[in-house]
Image: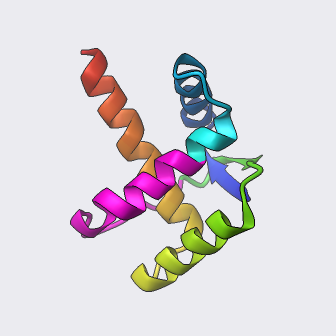
Amino acid sequence: MSLRLPRPMHEAMKALAARRGLKAADFYVETVETFIRDHMAGYRHLFAIENDAVHISVNVPVRFAHTVRDAALGRRVTPNELVFTAVSHVLESANAEAA
Protein backbone atom coordinates (compact mmCIF):
# COMPACT_ATOMS: atom_id res chain seq x y z
CA MET A 1 0.00 0.00 0.00
CA SER A 2 1.43 3.35 -0.99
CA LEU A 3 0.72 6.20 1.41
CA ARG A 4 1.67 9.77 2.05
CA LEU A 5 2.41 10.60 5.67
CA PRO A 6 4.59 13.20 7.35
CA ARG A 7 7.97 11.60 8.04
CA PRO A 8 7.80 12.28 11.83
CA MET A 9 4.45 10.49 11.96
CA HIS A 10 5.82 7.47 10.10
CA GLU A 11 8.90 7.39 12.34
CA ALA A 12 6.66 7.56 15.43
CA MET A 13 4.61 4.62 14.12
CA LYS A 14 7.77 2.57 13.52
CA ALA A 15 9.04 3.36 17.03
CA LEU A 16 5.71 2.49 18.63
CA ALA A 17 5.57 -0.75 16.64
CA ALA A 18 9.08 -1.66 17.82
CA ARG A 19 8.14 -0.96 21.46
CA ARG A 20 5.19 -3.32 21.04
CA GLY A 21 7.32 -5.99 19.36
CA LEU A 22 5.60 -5.63 15.98
CA LYS A 23 6.73 -4.99 12.43
CA ALA A 24 5.73 -1.53 11.23
CA ALA A 25 3.52 -2.96 8.48
CA ASP A 26 1.69 -5.20 10.96
CA PHE A 27 1.20 -2.26 13.30
CA TYR A 28 -0.25 -0.15 10.47
CA VAL A 29 -2.71 -2.96 9.69
CA GLU A 30 -3.68 -3.33 13.36
CA THR A 31 -4.03 0.44 13.78
CA VAL A 32 -6.24 0.98 10.75
CA GLU A 33 -8.39 -2.12 11.27
CA THR A 34 -9.03 -1.09 14.89
CA PHE A 35 -9.83 2.45 13.80
CA ILE A 36 -12.31 1.29 11.14
CA ARG A 37 -13.97 -1.17 13.53
CA ASP A 38 -14.02 0.85 16.76
CA HIS A 39 -13.56 4.55 16.10
CA MET A 40 -14.35 5.67 12.55
CA ALA A 41 -18.08 6.02 13.14
CA GLY A 42 -17.36 8.57 15.86
CA TYR A 43 -15.29 10.78 13.58
CA ARG A 44 -17.43 13.24 11.69
CA HIS A 45 -14.51 14.32 9.52
CA LEU A 46 -11.37 12.52 8.52
CA PHE A 47 -8.13 14.46 8.24
CA ALA A 48 -6.57 15.44 4.93
CA ILE A 49 -2.91 14.79 4.40
CA GLU A 50 -0.27 17.48 4.40
CA ASN A 51 1.11 18.56 1.04
CA ASP A 52 4.71 17.98 2.12
CA ALA A 53 4.11 14.43 3.29
CA VAL A 54 6.55 11.82 2.03
CA HIS A 55 5.61 8.69 0.14
CA ILE A 56 5.95 5.48 2.08
CA SER A 57 5.18 1.92 1.08
CA VAL A 58 3.78 -0.61 3.51
CA ASN A 59 3.41 -4.28 2.59
CA VAL A 60 -0.10 -5.25 3.61
CA PRO A 61 -2.40 -8.14 2.76
CA VAL A 62 -4.63 -7.56 -0.26
CA ARG A 63 -7.66 -8.16 1.96
CA PHE A 64 -6.60 -5.25 4.17
CA ALA A 65 -6.11 -2.94 1.18
CA HIS A 66 -9.64 -3.80 0.03
CA THR A 67 -11.01 -3.16 3.54
CA VAL A 68 -9.40 0.27 3.61
CA ARG A 69 -10.61 1.10 0.11
CA ASP A 70 -14.18 0.04 0.88
CA ALA A 71 -14.29 1.93 4.18
CA ALA A 72 -12.90 5.05 2.50
CA LEU A 73 -15.42 4.84 -0.32
CA GLY A 74 -18.20 4.56 2.24
CA ARG A 75 -17.06 7.83 3.80
CA ARG A 76 -16.26 9.50 0.46
CA VAL A 77 -12.63 10.07 1.40
CA THR A 78 -9.38 8.73 0.02
CA PRO A 79 -7.80 5.66 1.56
CA ASN A 80 -4.85 7.83 2.53
CA GLU A 81 -7.11 10.20 4.48
CA LEU A 82 -8.54 7.24 6.37
CA VAL A 83 -5.07 5.88 7.19
CA PHE A 84 -3.79 9.34 8.16
CA THR A 85 -6.70 9.78 10.57
CA ALA A 86 -6.23 6.30 12.04
CA VAL A 87 -2.52 6.93 12.57
CA SER A 88 -3.24 10.33 14.12
CA HIS A 89 -5.72 8.67 16.46
CA VAL A 90 -3.32 5.96 17.65
CA LEU A 91 -0.40 8.35 18.10
CA GLU A 92 -2.57 10.78 20.06
CA SER A 93 -3.74 7.90 22.26
CA ALA A 94 -0.15 6.71 22.78
CA ASN A 95 0.94 10.23 23.75
CA ALA A 96 -1.93 10.49 26.23
CA GLU A 97 -0.95 7.15 27.81
CA ALA A 98 2.67 8.28 28.11
CA ALA A 99 1.72 11.53 29.86
* The C terminus lies in quadrant: top left
Give above or below for 61 relative to 25: below
Where residue 42 appears, x then y in whole percent? Answer: 22, 64
Where residue 51 appears, x then y in whole percent? Answer: 60, 55
Of residues 57 and 38, the one nearer the viewer is 38
* The N terminus lies in quadrant: bottom right
Image quadrant where residue 44 sits:
bottom left
Q: Exactly how many numbered labels are in the figure? A: 0
* Magenta portion: prevailing SS class: helix
Q: Residue at 74% across / 48% down in the picture?
A: 58
Where residue 28 appears, x then y in whole percent? Answer: 58, 45
Q: Residue at 65% across / 53% down in the picture?
A: 4
Give above or below for 23 relative to 32: above
Q: Is residue 84 magenta?
A: no
Residue 61 shown left or right of residue 97 in the figure: right
Q: Which residues are magenta?
A: 29-49
Q: Residue at 41% across / 44% down in the picture?
A: 88
Give above or below for 20 relative to 81: above
Residue 44 shown left or right of residue 92 in the figure: left
> In the rendered image, is residue 84 in sight?
no
> In the rendered image, is residue 54 in sight?
yes
Q: Residue at 48% across / 63% down in the picture?
A: 82
Of residues 40 and 62, the one nearer the viewer is 62
